């Protein structure tokens, strides 16, 4: 305290209550004072120059500090000299332990640094990965592993590594959310539920290069299933040496894929470089893939693209016009997921009434939603639970088994509504609760539907917006009538969608129960005859429409721009997406 | 002075403990939990996860365990980023936010004081009106618009010069910091400008300034010693909480400029209901805020001896 | 002597002490001063106008939730003429027998428009390319030549015998360039394309026209008739809703929250802060530590709790709980500021003087201290207004404020940001209204302060 001068304190002592009345001095502050003040003006100027100087110094000081925490110098979008491409990542992977990974970003990174028994090629066909060849019959699958597949520490990838990874995934203590994807393996479910020891899992290493898998039941798509990240190998002694931190940081991970993570600055950067131990290294052209920016802001990524800093950027309906004016060549991509309105079928809800659901179904026009509200090419109007890209017996499933035809019919909708009112004994119907998420797309769509139901059906709908976990809590508890939901594929078989509304499926949040549908799901699960399975899926497709289980809205797509020099990027609905393993930089 | 500081610090610890307690029970009272996810999980897995994270114990027990760990400086492991400890998250991301925050607040403080003094000086004249207009714009347009516009301007600037004048996004070097800290500091600067103007106007017409003037003191001395020093008090008052708020509230700016700061963890943790991260960041933020308030109160005494600290 | 005359007794002038001009109360005086301040007066009128806009506006405009899907995101003054067309009927397309061929794929020989290009649909077919396994259709707003800018890909036609495409994606009246690229067996594009230049006209079906009130009955309209679409003075938003009526309806929420919340929490802040500052000592310490405690609470978490506490069902608007929660969680900043000022003022000479004259504490605080913190308080209010408006928008966005479709200025801004570059009117109008509100309150506040602040009086 003592450092302060007495000057101001003294001055304040002289300030008396009567300050109000003394008119003299301040009144004629006119011209004369202005000149005196000008001095202060220049004083202010000098002060501000000093201030700015101090500011710049401070910035320089801080800049040194920040280099320790930042992403560091990011290069140009494509750098042919070093064979590096720079990209942006929407979020950072929570961790990279393949047994516990659940999200798409983890899948994308893991797909570059790991390799399973098989992988997808650039035309989305299953091709050999660590396994050279394989035989699958009704009760067993045998994979013959190549002998030149190596971990990044130079040791060979063996059948034991697969057995260890799979056991870890189904072990109850791991609590892997994706353990269910291993359930086709014999005893996997029992192990996962704690009924059998982990050694009972039906996967054995016959020798270092032969992996035998006993199957729980006949399964027609096991080769597609083993491409999934949960099936990736893990080296046991490395995993155990990491003390529970496996996959947390670059040094906590052993790689057997085309790339290895060189640097991972959380929240800022993830840089992968070519893995020289990878058996098919000739397939890889890029030396490094640098995810130098982590942001979920679409506009920011697009701005980075414009600035030549990232090689790929997504567009949305709002930035499309700008992109056309830039004369960019755009690409579209269907990410394989289906979005729909899911009804709550619990007996206590109004939407349990089929006539009410049919009435709502008949006023919904997915084409209008996609073409007028979503407005982004790549999205296609939803017609079925099964998206168009799924393969059927010979060609595409939806070409072999077209979706039931849907036409908006307001008159018929009103008939159904009248019947529903009579059955429910409610006139008018109380407002329905439409559960929605807290993102712009969900807000836009829910508001659109609210008005559609009001104007075409006279039905009052209340939109219940909830943030992520609260929405899930409400979905699980069944506190809704309708909810905007979506489903993405885990593997390239219609079953990944087909069993969604089976009565035992935990993801059947609307609690739809229909023994007929359950029966068809069981046929599809256990039959090995493609025709029989596809027939079952068609029956499921019909039930879903006839019973108005869900109302398909759209199959999600996206539009993106790519640096014209970056070639060979593969986008796919199932598997690593986007896949840069075969990418290369063309001569400019 | 030392005694005062010690007392304040003890009070601070108690305040933080209250914050931790209130947040802990509020968090558990909210529907939903961190283990829920897009894909439903079976009962067995759920039970295993609950056991893993200690969520199977009664709430009071969880509370005692948590406070115990907190006292040992262990905030636990994040639910969303399964292998990262909350301590790591704070250690790695807080410095980034702090740097951004310090720059933003310096910029806001300098600008606010300068423009505030200017507007007070040229009251109702052109500079006042122009700055006033900008200030109104600065506060009526939300920061995300400025962030988006700022970045848009950078892209066009770079395109115009055909070379990278300033990076559009990212973090790491001096040039990365300029645009985001300007955008982040804008709102606070507008606020400080108005605050400074208002308090300056009162000081200029106060008796001691008039006395000083009539004594014939040099204007520089009057300005620095009497006017600025007294007018700056309200600015200092808000500066403390502002630093804390800016440092952790830069979510939008961090998102738009792809900056690895702590702000995004604050927002996402609540949405994800990531218990440990909510607790860790809230307690950390609370402690930081309480600390800044103490610093400001001490500064107060230094700037204005009339304010007795005891 | 005329002494007596020289010293005539003075007639007692009893009215010497009479105040010649009418006595003015503090408030009357303030009012006169306010009236003299032209800017403050203008802003007062603006505030009144906003009030009228808010209270009576919505009575004269249509509902804010009606969606005019024919005019999505249309700026003010956009062309509104449209032609009547029959209702949309799905098109079966054109299929041909394919010839297989080897060698590089060629561009389709020609492209033909089917019917008229309208905003309802643009239909086209092209000559089959021998050997092609499919086609990719692009659309652009400018001609692809010379740099092969094909624009945006609309669809992949993966059936080689199908040589037609129907575009319905967000067609605006104007010129479009459709290009078709043949695909090989792996779905890879051949480096050739054929382009079709079309000009789409705006159309509407007779049913829709009647529904939107553009005509009395379907019978009045024949295919080919020209009608004017509904007028939207300030344009429409991303769902074709009238901006003016949304602004008017939105004003109710935004002005209510934007004015009531700041006034309430600043009132709480003033009382709390002045109590803490004036009493000082241990009470001050406890009070201010409690303020720190409140500031540090995670806002979002407690908002969720408040909603549960108030038993707001999902889908219902919760303006009252939102207001209360905002007040409960936002007062500390104002309290801190006021306390700081009071601490400073407490030591001023005039306070001591007043105290010596026997002033009671409430009088001291109310008459001397709080009026002297007015400047700071007004600045805080000014800033609290937009911040409350945007807090409301944020809360509504995550479902904790006003339930849709009720609009508010803040949420209109949030939504407008996304289309900032293509449809600026969706951001500018709500932002303008917020700015005007803030400006008006700011100037009015300044005027009020000058009028109320005795010291300022002397400067006039």
Image: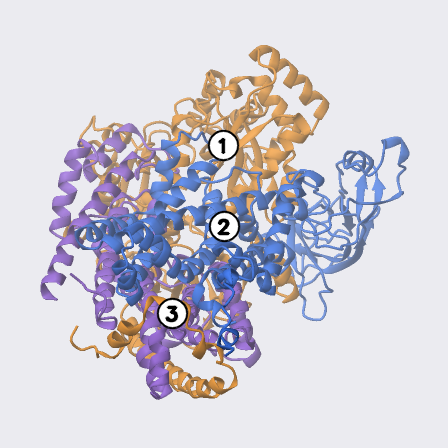
Chain colours: A orange, B purple, C blue
Nearest the eye: C190 or B173: B173
Local crowd size for mark 2, using a 10 Å CA cut-off: few (<14), some (14–19), many (≥20): many
Which residue is the site of mark 1? C316
The subunit letter for the residue under badge 1 reads C
For the C terminus of chain A, the quadrant is bottom right
> Which numbered marker is on residue A19?
3
Q: Are marks 2 and 1 on the same chain?
A: yes
> Which numbered marker is on residue C389?
2
* Between discs 2 and 1, the one toward the N terminus: 1
For discs 2 and 1, the disc positioned in front in the rendered view: 2
Q: CA separation, marks 3 and 1?
A: 55 Å
Mark 2, secondary structure of its residue: helix
Q: Residue furthest front?
A: C1
Q: Position of residue A419 (x, y in %)?
A: 63, 13
For discs 2 and 3, the disc positioned in front in the rendered view: 3
Is the Cβ of the residue at disc 2 closer than 8 Å to that at disc 1? no
Nearest the eye: A561 or C389: C389
Q: Position of residue A354 (x, y in %)?
A: 56, 18
Q: Position of residue A383 (x, y in %)?
A: 61, 34
A91 shown above or below A343: below
Q: In this rendering, does residue A557 appear at all?
A: yes
The subunit letter for the residue under badge 2 reads C
Q: Are marks 3 and 1 on the same chain?
A: no
For discs 3 and 1, the disc positioned in front in the rendered view: 3
Residue at image x 53%, y 71%? B153
Q: In this rendering, does residue C158 appear at all?
A: no
- Left/right placement of residue B141 relative to residue C61 reads left
Nearest the eye: C26 or A205: C26
A317 shown above or below A48: above
Residue at image x 35%, y 88%? B216
């Amino acid at each position: 305290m003592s450092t302060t001068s007495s000057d101001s304190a003294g001055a304040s002592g002289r300030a008396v209550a009567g300050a109000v009345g003394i008119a003299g001095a301040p009144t004629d502050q006119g011209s004369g004072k202005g000149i005196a003040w000008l001095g202060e003006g220049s004083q202010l100027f000098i002060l501000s120059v000093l201030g700015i100087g101090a500011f710049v110094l401070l910035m320089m000081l801080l800049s040194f500090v920040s280099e320790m925490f930042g992403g560091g110098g990011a290069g140009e979008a494509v750098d042919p000299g070093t064979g590096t491409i720079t990209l942006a990542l929407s979020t950072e992977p929570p961790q990279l332990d393949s047994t516990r990974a659940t999200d798409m970003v983890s899948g994308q990174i893991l797909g570059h640094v790991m390799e399973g028994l098989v992988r997808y090629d650039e035309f989305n066909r299953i091709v050999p990965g660590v396994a050279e060849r394989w035989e699958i019959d009704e009760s067993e699958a045998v994979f013959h592993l190549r002998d030149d597949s190596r971990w990044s520490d130079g040791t060979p990838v063996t059948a034991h590594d697969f057995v260890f990874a799979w056991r870890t995934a189904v072990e109850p203590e791991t609590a892997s959310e994706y353990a269910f994807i291993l359930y086709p393996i014999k005893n996997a479910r029992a192990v996962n539920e704690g009924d059998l020891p982990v050694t009972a899992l039906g996967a054995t290493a016959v020798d270092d290069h032969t992996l035998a898998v006993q199957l729980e039941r006949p399964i027609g798509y096991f080769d597609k299933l083993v491409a999934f990240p949960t099936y990736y190998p893990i080296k046991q002694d490395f995993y155990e040496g990491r003390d529970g931190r496996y996959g947390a940081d670059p040094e906590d991970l052993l790689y057997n894929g085309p790339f290895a993570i060189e640097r991972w600055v959380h929240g800022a950067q993830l840089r992968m470089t070519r893995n020289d131990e990878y058996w098919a290294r000739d397939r890889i052209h890029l030396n490094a893939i640098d995810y130098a920016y982590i942001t979920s802001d679409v506009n920011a990524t697009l701005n980075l693209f414009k600035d030549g800093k990232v090689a790929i950027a997504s567009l949305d309906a709002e930035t499309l016009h700008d992109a056309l004016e830039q004369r960019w060549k755009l690409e579209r991509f269907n990410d394989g997921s289906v979005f729909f309105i899911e009804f709550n079928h619990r007996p206590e809800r109004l939407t349990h009434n089929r006539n009410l659901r049919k009435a709502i179904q008949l006023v919904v026009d997915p084409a209008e939603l996609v073409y007028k509200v979503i407005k982004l090419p790549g999205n296609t109007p939803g017609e079925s639970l099964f998206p168009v890209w799924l393969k059927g017996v010979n060609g595409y499933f939806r070409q072999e088994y077209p979706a039931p035809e849907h036409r908006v019919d307001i008159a018929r909708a009103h008939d159904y509504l009248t019947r529903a009112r009579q059955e429910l004994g409610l006139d008018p119907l109380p407002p329905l609760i439409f559960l929605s998420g807290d993102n712009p797309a969900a807000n836009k769509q829910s508001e659109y539907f609210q008005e559609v139901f009001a104007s075409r059906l006279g039905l009052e709908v209340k939109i219940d917006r909830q943030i992520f976990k609260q929405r899930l809590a409400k979905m699980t508890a069944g506190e809704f009538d309708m909810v905007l939901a979506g489903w993405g594929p885990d593997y390239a078989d219609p079953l990944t969608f087909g069993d969604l509304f089976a009565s035992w499926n935990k993801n059947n949040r609307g609690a739809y129960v229909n023994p007929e549908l359950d029966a068809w799901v069981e046929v599809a699960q256990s039959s090995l005859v493609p025709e029989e399975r596809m027939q079952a899926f068609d029956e499921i497709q019909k039930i879903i429409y006839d019973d108005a289980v869900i109302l398909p809205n759209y199959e999600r797509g996206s539009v993106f721009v790519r640096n014209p020099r970056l070639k060979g990027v593969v986008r796919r609905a199932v598997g690593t997406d986007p896949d840069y393993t075969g990418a290369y930089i063309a001569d400019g | 002075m030392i005694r005062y500081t010690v007392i304040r610090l003890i009070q601070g610890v108690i305040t933080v403990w209250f914050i931790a307690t209130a947040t802990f029970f509020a968090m558990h009272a909210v529907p939903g939990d961190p283990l829920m996810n897009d894909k439903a999980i079976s009962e067995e897995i759920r039970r295993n996860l609950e056991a893993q994270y200690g969520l199977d114990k009664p709430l009071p027990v969880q509370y005692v365990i948590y406070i115990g760990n907190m006292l040992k400086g262990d905030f636990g492991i994040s639910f969303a980023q399964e292998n990262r400890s909350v301590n790591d998250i704070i250690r790695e991301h807080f410095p980034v936010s702090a740097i951004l925050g310090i720059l933003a607040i310096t910029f806001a403080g300098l600008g606010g004081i300068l423009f505030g003094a200017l507007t007070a000086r040229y009251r109702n004249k052109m500079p006042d009106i122009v700055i006033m207009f900008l200030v109104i714009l600065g506060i009526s347009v939300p920061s995300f618009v400025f962030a988006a516009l700022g970045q848009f301007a950078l892209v066009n600037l770079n395109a115009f010069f055909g070379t990278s004048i300033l990076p559009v996004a990212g973090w790491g070097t001096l040039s990365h910091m300029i645009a985001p800290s300007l955008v982040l500091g804008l709102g606070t600067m507008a606020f400080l400008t108005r605050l400074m103007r208002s308090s300056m106007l009162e000081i200029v017409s106060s008796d001691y300034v008039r006395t000083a003037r009539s004594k014939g003191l040099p204007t520089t001395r009057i300005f620095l010693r009497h006017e600025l020093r007294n007018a700056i008090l309200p600015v200092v008052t808000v500066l403390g909480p502002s630093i804390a708020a800016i440092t952790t509230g830069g979510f939008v700016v961090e998102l738009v400029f792809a900056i690895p700061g702590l702000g995004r963890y604050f927002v996402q943790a609540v949405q994800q209901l990531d218990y440990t991260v909510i607790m860790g960041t809230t307690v950390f933020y609370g402690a930081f805020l309480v600390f800044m308030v103490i610093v400001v109160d001490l500064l107060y005494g230094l700037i204005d001896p009339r304010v007795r600290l005891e | 002597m005329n002494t007596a005359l020289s010293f005539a007794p003075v007639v007692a002038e009893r009215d010497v002490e009479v105040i010649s001009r009418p006595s003015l109360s503090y408030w009357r005086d303030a009012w006169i001063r306010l009236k003299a301040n032209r800017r403050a007066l203008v802003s007062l009128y603006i505030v009144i106008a906003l009030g009228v806009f808010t209270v009576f506006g919505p009575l004269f405009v249509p509902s804010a939730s009606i969606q005019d899907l024919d005019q999505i995101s249309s700026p003010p003054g956009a062309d509104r003429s449209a032609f009547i067309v029959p209702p949309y009927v799905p098109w079966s397309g054109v299929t041909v027998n394919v010839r297989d061929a080897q060698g590089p794929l060629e561009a389709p020989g020609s492209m033909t428009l089917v019917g008229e290009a309208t905003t309802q649909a643009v239909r086209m077919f092209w000559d089959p390319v021998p050997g092609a396994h499919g086609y990719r259709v692009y659309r652009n707003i400018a001609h692809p030549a010379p740099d092969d800018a094909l624009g945006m890909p609309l669809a992949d036609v993966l059936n080689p015998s199908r040589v037609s495409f129907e575009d319905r994606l967000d067609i605006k009246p104007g010129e479009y360039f459709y290009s078709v690229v043949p695909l090989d067996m792996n779905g890879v594009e051949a480096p050739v394309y054929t382009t079709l230049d079309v000009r789409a006209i705006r159309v509407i079906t007779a049913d829709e026209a009647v529904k939107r009130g553009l005509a009395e009955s379907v019978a009045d309209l024949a295919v080919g008739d020209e009608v004017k679409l509904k007028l939207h003075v300030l344009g429409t938003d991303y769902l074709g809703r009238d901006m003016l009526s949304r602004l008017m309806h939105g004003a109710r929420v935004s002005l209510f929250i934007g004015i009531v919340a700041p006034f309430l929490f600043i009132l709480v802040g003033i009382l709390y802060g002045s109590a803490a500052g004036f009493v000082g000592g241990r009470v001050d310490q406890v009070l201010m530590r409690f303020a720190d405690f409140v500031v540090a609470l995670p806002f979002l978490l407690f908002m969720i709790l408040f909603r549960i506490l108030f038993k707001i069902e999902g889908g219902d608007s919760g303006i009252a709980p939102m207001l209360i929660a905002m007040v409960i969680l936002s007062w500390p900043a104002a309290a801190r500021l006021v306390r700081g000022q009071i601490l400073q003022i407490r030591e001023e000479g005039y306070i001591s003087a007043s105290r010596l004259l026997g002033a009671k504490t409430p009088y001291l605080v109310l008459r001397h201290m709080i009026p002297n913190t007015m400047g700071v308080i007004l600045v805080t209010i000014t800033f609290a207004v937009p911040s409350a408006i945007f807090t409301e928008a944020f809360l509504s966005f995550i479902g904790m404020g006003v339930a849709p479709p009720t609009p508010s200025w803040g949420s209109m801004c949030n939504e407008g940001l996304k289309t900032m570059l293509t449809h600026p009117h969706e951001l500018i109008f709500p932002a303008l209204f917020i700015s005007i509100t803030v400006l008006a309150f700011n100037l009015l506040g300044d005027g009020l302060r000058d009028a109320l602040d005795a010291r300022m009086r002397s400067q006039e």
